[in-house]
Image (cartoon, grey):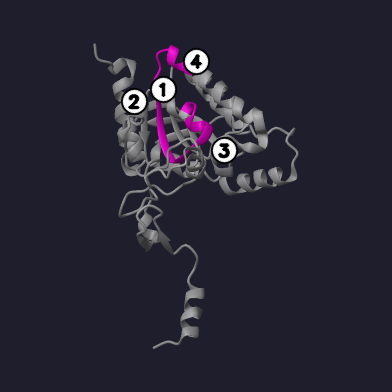
Amino acid sequence: MPSHDELVKRMDAIPDHVLRECPICHAKFLSMRLGRDHTCPKCGYGFRILAKRRVKITFDKFTEIDQNITVPDRYTDEKYRAKIAKAKKVTGLNESVLTGIGSLNKQQVAVGIMDPFWIMGSLGSATGEKITRLFELATRKDLPVVMFTSSGGARMQEGIHSLMQMAKVSSAVAEHSAAGLLYIVVLCDPTTGGVTASFAMDGDIILAEPHALVGFAGRRVIEQTIMQTPPKDFQSAETVMKHGFIDQIVKRSDMKKTLTQLLRLHTKENAYG
């Protein structure tokens, strides 16, 4: 029987992240069991992933656009600039959303993917600019839009400039809709704050990944406001769907197939009538 000190030594020798725990069902498993899709093998929860990884597991082809748009120089706070530098290094992106033109079974689609590792996918002025340009391009080219949301909401370091992006993007979404074009949203963990209050809920079809947190204000703020304790799962995608805000919950492994079918059904050449 190994001594306590020997066991501690053995534990210290184990590399980080070999063992994972699901934040939803609390199952513990080896990281290799996450698989290509990075989902819990027990409950199907989709772990947070980089935007570039989501491209690889979802689209046949992808061409990035507006990759050089980033936080304006007018924001000079040193702590904020340090966070920006770290986010760029971790994600390989200049802003918290990756935009481009993708392909699903030869169907072209405009794509936006928010990255939860870029200052929690927060909505800044450059984020809003990229998403707005994406919708404008889709409207000009007569393309549907698929947007994967994963965000903590408006970016507090940019104040009112961040909040203005809600109206700015929603306006571009409205013009895209007026042109008779399809907009599909996929709510990923987490989708909160100003993103939920604007373009995340503007979609013609709203999908969500299993157990994604979807809401506006955080639990603590709600409890302090209404002086009550909400149910444990009141902001889970499953509960939000029960109350009519989500059309379908789709496993990450089925997302590519589901999006392909929806796009095929809603393209003009395949429309019924």
Q: Which residue is mark 4?
A: 140
Tell me if residue 197 can be seen.
Answer: yes
Percent coordinates x, y for residue 38 in the rendering: 40, 50
Instruction: Give me the disc on residue 243.
Output: none
Disc 3 to disc 1, C-alpha distance: 24 Å
Instruction: Give me the disc on residue 144.
Output: 1
Residue 93 higher or lower than 140, as above or below: below
The amino acid sitting under disc 4 is Arg
Q: Which residue is mark 3?
A: 122
Q: Is residue 188 magenta?
A: yes
The amino acid sitting under disc 1 is Pro
Residue in the picture at 32% in, 20% down? 266
The amino acid sitting under disc 3 is Ser
Q: Are marks 4 and 2 in contact (CB under 8 Å)?
A: no
Instruction: Give me the disc on residue 263.
Output: 2
Q: Are marks 1 and 2 in contact (CB under 8 Å)?
A: yes
Position of residue 35 in the picture relative to residue 66 (left or right): left
Q: Magenta region: which residues?
A: 174-199
Residue in the picture at 36% in, 39% down? 237
Please tell me which residue lies in front, 203 or 24.
Answer: 24
Q: Quadrant of residue 254?
A: top left
- The mark nearer the N terminus, 3 or 1, is 3
The amino acid sitting under disc 2 is Leu
Percent coordinates x, y for residue 47 in the rendering: 42, 49
